[in-house]
Amino acid sequence: MEAHLEKRFQDKIDQEIKIEPKDWMPEKYRKTLVRQISQHAHSEIVGMLPEGNWITRAPSLKRKLGLLAKVQDEAGHGLYLYAAAETLGVERADLVADLHSGKAKYSSIFNYPTMTWADIGAIGWLVDGAAIMNQVPLCRCSYGPYARAMVRVCKEESFHQRQGFEIMMTLCNGTTEQKEMAQDALNRWWWPSLMMFGPNDDESPNSKQSMAWKIKRFSNDDLRQKFVDVTVEQAKHLGINIPDPDLNWNEETQHYDFGEIDWEEFWNVVKGNGPCNKARLDARNKAHDEGAWVREAAVAYAEKKRKRKEKVA
Amino acid sequence: MKNWPLWEIFVRSKQGLSHKHVGSLHAADAEMAMQNARDVYTRRMEGVSIWVVESVHVTASDPDEKESMFDPANDKVYRHPTFYDVPDGVTHI
């Protein structure tokens, strides 16, 4: 029976028929999606923290409006994604509890600090740029609710990347000091951005199954290469240098060759030892705990309104 | 209560079109669901009207019964105009 169902499921996937919430699916498919979608949601939520750091110090009203709108979008993206995960029979409160206890992971990029205003530009340009590279293929993911959430996310994300690039452009056209700030931000964010695509293909054991299930459409290394190819050209427009001495155009492959990623640093941050892992979790827990009374008050107020309505009726 | 109730959100993108399901969210009551739906789903002029429906009130067809529900329509070609022959030259029909 199980084998028969599994074959029918795979046939649907192969024919590009989307899987919807109540359809039969292998337990491992469900678990993989819950893990991936909830990690993605957590990343959106934690991703608000490094940027929130600069809202009050944005250099102009225009920049403040842009950054506020971007951070608000990220809260929305977290919400779409938690809702997509909930269609798989899990509860948001449990997912959030796993984030707050440290059990669940989120993108390691958000464990790096935002030290200058230029970091806000670099995050929009590089981090959102890498996220878009990852997310565009997810719009065609085999699981309907995830794919639909990603369509909304991608539409909004392109504004994020452009606002980041514009910040970088403005700094690069500014004073020597401002341009140095932009270069310094690129130096610090370049390698962590490349790490966002995950381990090399031969070190990524779950990728093969995810590709067969069409959750994933391109391999980590393919997406990383695509990101390098487009971003190097963008850096030329800014007039700043990618911090990689091994970066070279390869006529034969028609791609950029680039240096080896420091995987020790990558795994170290994943394991919780990055510069801001503790600060991020502390901030999340503090916000959640200190917001408890608001959640309780909302329920009490809804109940009071309901009772008043009953009395009138 | 661990989670606020879940609400399904429907948005009319412009006058003349029907409301379409856009997603869901948690809220303590309908009023809050409406406010949150506005902030989450219509930040870029995506709509002119919103419906919020508590998810527990939606009755859905069972995907396991998809065949018995929908296949009977499959062999009823006589419900479509192309089933009927009309000679060439007959117009406005």
Image (tube, coloured by chain):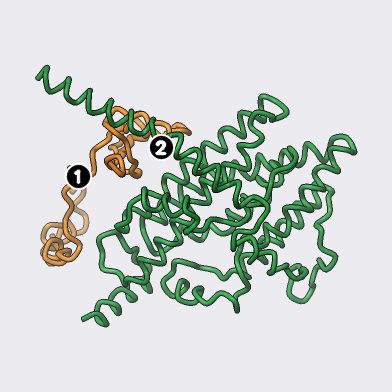
Chain colours: A green, B orange
Pick the front one: A269 or B22: A269
In the rendered image, the residue lying farthest to the top is: A312
Question: Residue placed at 60% from the left, 57% from the top?
Answer: A108
Question: Seen in the image, is A239 located left or right of residue A268?
Answer: right
* Rendering coords of residue A304 (x, y %): 22, 24
Question: Seen in the image, is B86 located left or right of residue A194?
Answer: left
Badge 2, how many Cα within 10 Å: few under 14, some, many 20+? many
Question: Residue placed at 33% from the left, 36% from the top?
Answer: B11
Q: Is residue A209 above or below residue A84?
A: below
To which residue does mark 2 refer?
Answer: B41
Q: Quadrant of the N terminus of chain A?
A: bottom left
The picture quadrant where one finds residue A90 is: bottom left
* Rendering coords of residue A45 (x, y %): 51, 45
To which residue does mark 1 refer?
Answer: B56
Question: Residue placed at 67% from the left, 60% from the top?
Answer: A227
In terms of secondary structure, where does tag 1 sit?
helix
Amino acid of disc 1: Val
Chain ID, mark 2: B
